[in-house]
């Protein structure tokens, strides 16, 4: 279905469209407190990573209110300790954006499809990643905006154990405190596959999860077991961005997430700080 939508977007005739190329890049550090998605302190693994990305896109104005965005991206993640999770990936995307009127406060809606591939150092994790999202927003005032969206994600890996599907809905409030400083407060709910790691084996998870024994991501003495199951995640995010120059900004974000599927219940803290370039 997602491939059909992407193909349909790419096949739209563009005889009178005006192109608008845009480029972006970002790089910075990421901290995650519970990489192993475990609810036992002895199994929780934390680490820092260096996260980078680059994007190129062409915006085509099909009519006064309708815009087609085509893009390509590269991304990488390098972990300090657990290098089996290191990854590099790329993808292409297409999206239609419709604005209901003129001006910054006019409501808008976007339908976007992205298809990509991520290669991991642990090759059994390498996977195709397909996401289909619907997002909308409205400016409540000159300094205040509201956005919300839905995202379906499908990850397909060799052997199917690390396959994941999920549905996610979110909303956030964005405030322009000054011409250079913007902050955002968001909430998201995710329902889908999660993978939790533990040692020794956990009989309490056997009845509700698929199991892959002897995973070496977090060490081989002893090996960890991986458990795949469906869970619900509630997350709250606080973010801020400060524009240094016309095309350059600093962005920081903090997220608290709580995931559960009885008897598994765990928390995660994520902190990210990066420099972003957009032209």
Image (tube, rainbow, N blue to C red):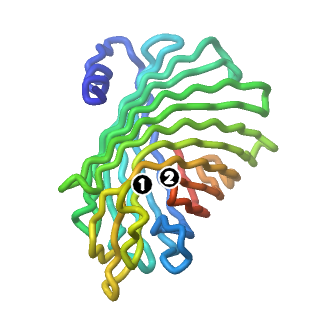
x, y percent for residue 79 = 43, 73
Q: What element carries label 2?
A: strand
Which one is in front, 205 or 161? 205
Decide: few, some or many residues near mark 2? Use Cα within 10 Å; few <14, some 14-19, many ≥20: some
Q: Which of marks 1 and 2 is nearer the N terminus?
A: 1
Q: Which residue is drawn at 58% across and 25% down?
A: 136
Which residue carries the number 1 mark? 194
Residue 104 sits in quarter: top right
Q: Is mark 1 on a helix, strand or loop?
A: strand
Q: Residue at x 45, y 29 (%)?
A: 20
Asked whether the beta carbons under mark 1 and mark 2 sit within 8 Å of each other, the answer is: yes
Q: Which residue is drawn at 41% across and 64% down?
A: 77
Q: Which mark is residue 24?
A: none
Residue 137 sits in quarter: top right
Up the image or down, 43 lies above or below 61; here it is below
x, y percent for residue 225 = 33, 71
Q: Quadrant of the N terminus?
A: top left
Would you say 98 lies left or right of 94 here? right
Which residue carries the number 2 mark? 261
x, y percent for residue 249 = 63, 53
């Amino acid at each position: 279905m997602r491939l059909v939508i992407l193909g349909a977007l790419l096949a739209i005739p563009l005889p009178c469209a005006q192109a608008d190329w845009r480029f972006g890049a970002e790089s910075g550090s990421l901290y995650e407190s519970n990489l192993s998605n475990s609810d036992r302190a002895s199994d929780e693994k934390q680490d820092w990573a260096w996260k980078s990305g680059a994007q190129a896109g062409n915006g085509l104005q099909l009519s006064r209110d309708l815009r087609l965005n085509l893009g390509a991206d590269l991304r990488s993640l390098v972990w300090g300790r657990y290098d089996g999770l290191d990854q590099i990936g790329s993808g292409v995307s297409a999206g239609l954006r419709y604005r209901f009127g003129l001006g910054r406060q006019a409501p808008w809606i976007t339908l976007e499809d992205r298809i990509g591939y991520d290669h991991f150092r642990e090759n059994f994790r390498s996977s195709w990643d397909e996401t289909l999202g619907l997002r909308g927003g409205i400016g409540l005032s000159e300094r205040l905006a509201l956005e919300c969206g839905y995202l379906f994600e499908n990850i397909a890996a060799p052997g199917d154990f690390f396959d994941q599907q999920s549905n996610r809905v979110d909303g956030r409030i964005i405030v322009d405190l000054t011409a250079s400083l913007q902050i955002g407060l968001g909430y998201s709910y995710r329902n889908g596959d999660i993978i939790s790691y533990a040692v020794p084996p956990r009989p309490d998870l056997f009845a509700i999860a698929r199991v892959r024994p002897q995973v070496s991501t977090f060490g081989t003495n002893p090996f960890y077991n991986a458990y795949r199951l469906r869970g619900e995640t509630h997350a709250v995010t606080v973010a801020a961005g400060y524009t240094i120059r016309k095309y350059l900004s600093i962005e920081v974000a903090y997220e608290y997430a709580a995931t559960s599927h009885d008897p598994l219940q765990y928390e995660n803290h994520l902190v990210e700080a990066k420099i972003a370039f957009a032209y």
